[in-house]
Structures are given as C-alpha cells and as structure tokens.
Image (tube, coloured by chain):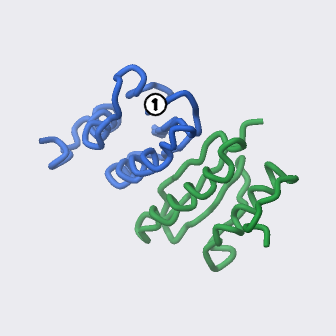
Chain colours: A green, B blue
Amino acid sequence: MAHKLKIVYCTQCRWLFRASWMTQELLTTFEQELDEVALAPGSGGTFDVILNEKTIFSRSEEGRFPESKELKQLVRDQIAPHRDLGHSDR
Amino acid sequence: MAHKLKIVYCTQCRWLFRASWMTQELLTTFEQELDEVALAPGSGGTFDVILNEKTIFSRSEEGRFPESKELKQLVRDQIAPHRDLGHSDR
C-alpha cells in the first residue's frame, strides 16, 4: 500500500520551517515505508498531520505542537506497527 | 486549479536535504499558488521535479541539478505566467 503523509501548516504563522523539519525527520525514519510527505500551505493557526487522508495530529485539537518522537510513534503505529524506533520509543 | 509539485530524490545519494531546501524555496515564493509540495524517496540518482504530473526538471536528463532560480522560473511559467519573480528573473 502507498503511504502518503501531509502536513498542513499556517503560512502566516511562518510554520513552514517547523513543518519542513518534521518532514525530514519522518522521511529519514520511514524512507522505506512512506511514498511521499507533502507540505501544504494553510491558514488560521493550522498544523495538521494527515496520514493516508486521516488526521493523526491536529494542533488546534491538542493545543500544542507534536514532538518529533511522538509523530514518529503515531506514524509507526499506522504503517509499521512492529517496527522498533530505538531511542524514539523510550 | 490545484497545483501539486513533487520532488523525487535519491535516498542513497542523501539528497533529502537538497530537495527539502528546494521545497522551502518554492513554497515561500508560491505559497498562494501551490497547494502542496511533496517529497518522495527514490533511488538510482533520481532528482526529478514534477508539476501536476508533468516532469519539469530531471537530473538524469540534464546531467546536473536545477538552480533555485531556474526552478522558480519553470514553476512560474506553468502556474503564474504573468508573475514577476524580482531578482530571480534577472
């Protein structure tokens, strides 16, 4: 199955660089599993992480940003449940 | 029309960071016009830039990487032909 992740970020808040960093973290960890990670300009304080059309983290719902480790665990649980993430699992 | 850009990069060559930089350049310049820019892991020395399913730059064909300015002009010509890119047009 093709796994597509998308991060929608608020341009006015200048979260492109944060979103871009997360993209690099995820593509480094899941380069075999992810077919693509897309960055999509948004507005209104949005920082949503969407995996295969399903939102796995939303800043507006959580009231905070996701940590890199947390996002890796959320993605792993969906696309590579048996994968040990090493220090990102402790 | 929704404009989608994708950069396919060779993971073994470690071109993620170059592709990520280009993504930031393009999303900064075309944040109104581009709906998303995706990074897609590839292999075999690939560095392809695909706009709306059409390849606009291929490292294997050109024998070199695209410059940031060049890529912005190629994208502009397709999605915002009347747009002046300022110093990226000189």
Tag 1 residue? B48
x, y percentage for residue B31?
A: 38, 53
| Identity of the residue drawn at 55% across and 27% down | B44
x, y percentage for residue A51?
A: 70, 52
Location of the C terminus of chain A by quadrant is bottom right
| Identity of the residue drawn at 56% across and 40% down | B11
Question: Where is residue A36, by image quadrant?
Answer: top right
Q: Nearer the viewer, residue B19 or B26?
A: B19
B6 above or below B53?
below
For label 1, count other residues whose C-alpha is less than 10 Å away and answer few (under 14), some (14-19) or many (20+).
many
Task: Name the residue at the top extreme.
Answer: B61
| Identity of the residue drawn at 65% across and 49% down | A5
Give, as a three-letter code, the residue at label 1.
Asp
Disc 1 is placed on an element classified as strand
x, y percentage for residue B48?
A: 46, 30
x, y percentage for residue A15?
A: 47, 67
Question: Where is residue B72, by image quadrant?
Answer: top left
In the picture provided, is A50 more to the left or to the right than B5? right
Task: Name the residue at the right extreme.
Answer: A82
| Identity of the residue drawn at 46% across and 25% down | B54
Location of the N terminus of chain A by quadrant is top right
Q: Nearer the viewer, residue B29 or B61?
A: B61
**Subunit ID for the residue under disc 1:** B
In the picture provided, is B70 more to the left or to the right than A64? left
Total of numbered circles in the picture?
Answer: 1
In the picture provided, is B79 more to the left or to the right than A32? left
Task: Name the residue at the left extreme.
Answer: B90
Task: Name the residue at the bottom extreme.
Answer: A63
A13 above or below B84?
below
Q: Nearer the viewer, residue B15 or A4?
A: B15
